[in-house]
Amino acid sequence: MSEDSGPRSLAVILGQINRGEFLAEANEELHELAKALEQHAAATAGKAKGTFTLKLTLTADGKTCTISPEVIVKSPKPLRGNAVFWFDRNSNLADRDPRQMDLPLREVPPPAGARDAKVKSEPARSV
C-alpha cells in the first residue's frame, strides 16, 4: 500500500493482529456481553447496561509500531437482595435482634376427639 492512499482501515488492522485471533476473541466477547444484557433485562423487566471497550496501546520506536490490544467488558451486575443484621454486645453481626426476646413457642396437639372438618363449597354467585 502506498503512503499517499489515505489512512488504513481500522477493521483491516484489527483483523491482522495475532493473525485475526484478537478480532475473533473480541467478537465473541461482544456476543457474550449482548447475551448477558438480554438475560439481565429479561430477569429485571427493565433495562440493562454494560460496556465494551477496545483498547489499543501503540508503542513506536521510530521505524516500527507495536500494537498491544485489549478488550475490557463490564457486564451487568447480578441481582442480589439485601440482608439486615444487628450488632450484638461484641460488635458481631447477628441475623436476629439480640435485644428481642425469643417467644417460647411449642406445638399444640389437637384436642381429643377432634376431626377434620368437612367444608361444603359452593360456586360463587354474581350479585
Image (cartoon, grey):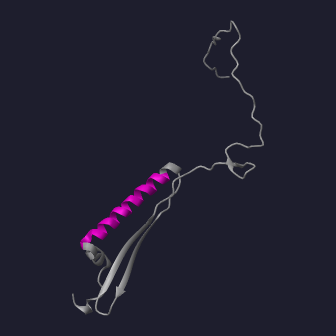
Which residue corresponds to the image point at 32% horizontal and 78% vertical from the top-left? 10
Q: Does the magenta portion include 2?
A: no
Position of 127 with respect to 30 (left or right) is right
**Residue interval drawn in magenta:** 19-41
**Residue at the outermost top position:** 113
Residue 16: % across, % down: 26, 76
Question: As drawn, which residue projects farthest toward the left?
Answer: 1
The reply, left or right, for residue 19 in relation to residue 92 is left
Q: Name above or below for residue 86 compared with residue 121.
A: below
Q: Is residue 28 above or below residue 126?
A: below
Picture quarter with the N terminus: bottom left
Please name the residue shown 62% across and 15% down the image.
122
Q: Quadrant of residue 124?
A: top right
Q: Residue at x 36, y 60 (%)?
A: 31
Residue 5 image-quadrant placement: bottom left
Identity of the residue furthest to the front in this view: 90
On the rendered structure, is 19 left or right of 126?
left
Q: Main secondary structure of the magenta part?
A: helix
Query: x, y percentage for residue 48?
Result: 50, 58
Residue 117 location, x and y as percent? 65, 11
Tell me the quadrant of the picture where the C terminus can be found.
Answer: top right
**Position above or below: 17 against 27:** below
The percent position of residue 96, horizontal first and vertical second, equals 70, 42
**Which is more toward the observer, 117 or 72?**
72
Q: Residue at x 75, y 34 (%)?
A: 102
Q: Does the stretch in magenta take in 32? A: yes
